[in-house]
Image (cartoon, rainbow, N blue to C red):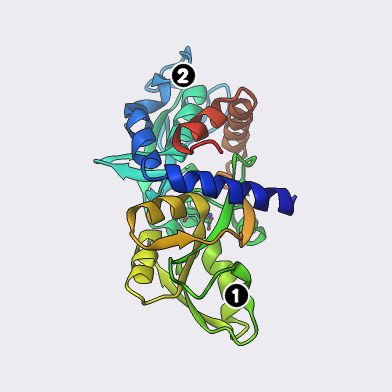
Amino acid sequence: MKKPIALLLALAMTVSLAACGSTPEESGTSSDSNATSQESGSENQESDASTPDSDSGDADNQDGFTTAVEGKLTMATNAAFPPYEYMEGSNIVGIDAEIAAAIAGKLGLELQIDDMEFDSITEAIKSGKADVGLAGMTVTPDRQEEVNFTVSYATGVQVVIVTEDSAITSVDDLFAEGASHVIGVQRNTTGDIYTTDDIEKKGLGSIDRYSKGADAVQALKTGKVDCVVIDNEPAKSFVAEVEGLKILETEYITEDYAAAMSKDNTALYEAVNTALEELLADGTIQSIIDKYIAAE
Ligand code: GLN
């Protein structure tokens, strides 16, 4: 499984290097209104008999689920992770926003999106303030102790961004004997978790943690860090926007993205997970992803 993905990634990156300048902006525009607004859920799906404002969506509806806010599916995210979630004007758009809108539509709920720090999402889910965390979130064993993950809807790859003239030419350079790089990451993401374990704890370098991936990339640009370890798709959009940076062709690790939900709300979990499975099976998820990510 690892080798083909590495190859595919290398290919994808070669192609996307040529294309990535225009990809996020272009597809973002076409994602239009239905991703963020309160009424988005019911708009773009086949009409459902129950309307969001009627008595659906609360404890006694026929699906038996409750939501944080009656009649709404509340999504927690960090809108600084293009093309999965990012700001377009005052709207949050992107792959996850559209997936959530499609799920909400199937459940007869309105979508509401709450923007927060990435490391606040799990707490928002656990406390029941939000129904679903959709944030390009990687399934990890530690997180599985805190939340229920739905079926995976996408694959992510941790990659390494360096300056074009960097002495770091392969991921393996980060683990080499005597290595002492300063690695930039987004706080509490898997890039942070893995590099902390693989590099910092082994005395092979130190980690600088930023609240946004884009800030870590700026730190690379200004020479404060030697590289940034981050998910491949945001990496592509950041590199497209900042001169003089590139993504190493070797991958750090491949991971699965899924939606995070409360362990206590099993009826809602079942409803959302089933909706997501249907959207995967009928090709809706793939077409949303294809809108934002250039096919290889
Ligand atoms: N996939 C990474 C993680 O789950 C990063 C997600 C993000 O920054 N939104 O940790």
Look at label 2 and name its amino acid.
Answer: Gln
Taking the spot 63% from the left edge, 34% from the top edge, the residue there is 270
Q: Position of residue 87 (x, y in %)?
A: 31, 44
- Whole-angstrom CA distance, mark 1 to mark 2, is 48 Å
Q: Position of residue 40 (x, y in %)?
A: 37, 27
Image height check: is 25 above or below 181?
above
Q: Residues within 10 Å of mark 1 (few under 14, many from 20)?
A: some
Question: Furthest residue to the right?
Answer: 1
Question: Is 176 on the left-hand or right-hand side of 239?
Answer: right
In depth, the one of 260 and 206 nearer the eye is 206
Taking the spot 60% from the left edge, 58% from the top edge, the residue there is 143
Question: Furthest residue to the left?
Answer: 89
Look at label 1 and name its amino acid.
Answer: Asp
Q: Position of residue 118 (x, y in %)?
A: 43, 57
Q: Is mark 1 within 8 Å of ligand 1?
A: no
Taking the spot 40% from the left edge, 39% from the top edge, the residue there is 23
- Could you tell me if residue 133 is visible in this image? no
Secondary structure of the residue carrying numbered label 1: helix
In depth, the one of 38 and 66 nearer the eye is 38
In depth, the one of 38 and 244 nearer the eye is 244
Image height check: is 60 above or below 245?
above
- Residue 146 found in image quarter: bottom right
Q: Which residue is mark 2?
A: 45
Q: Residues within 10 Å of mark 2 (few under 14, many from 20)?
A: some
Q: Position of residue 99 (x, y in %)?
A: 49, 33
Image height check: is 280 above or below 159?
above
Image height check: is 200 above or below 123?
below
Q: Which residue is mark 1?
A: 173
Q: Nearer the viewer, mark 1 or mark 2?
A: 1
Secondary structure of the residue carrying numbered label 2: loop
In depth, the one of 227 and 44 nearer the eye is 227
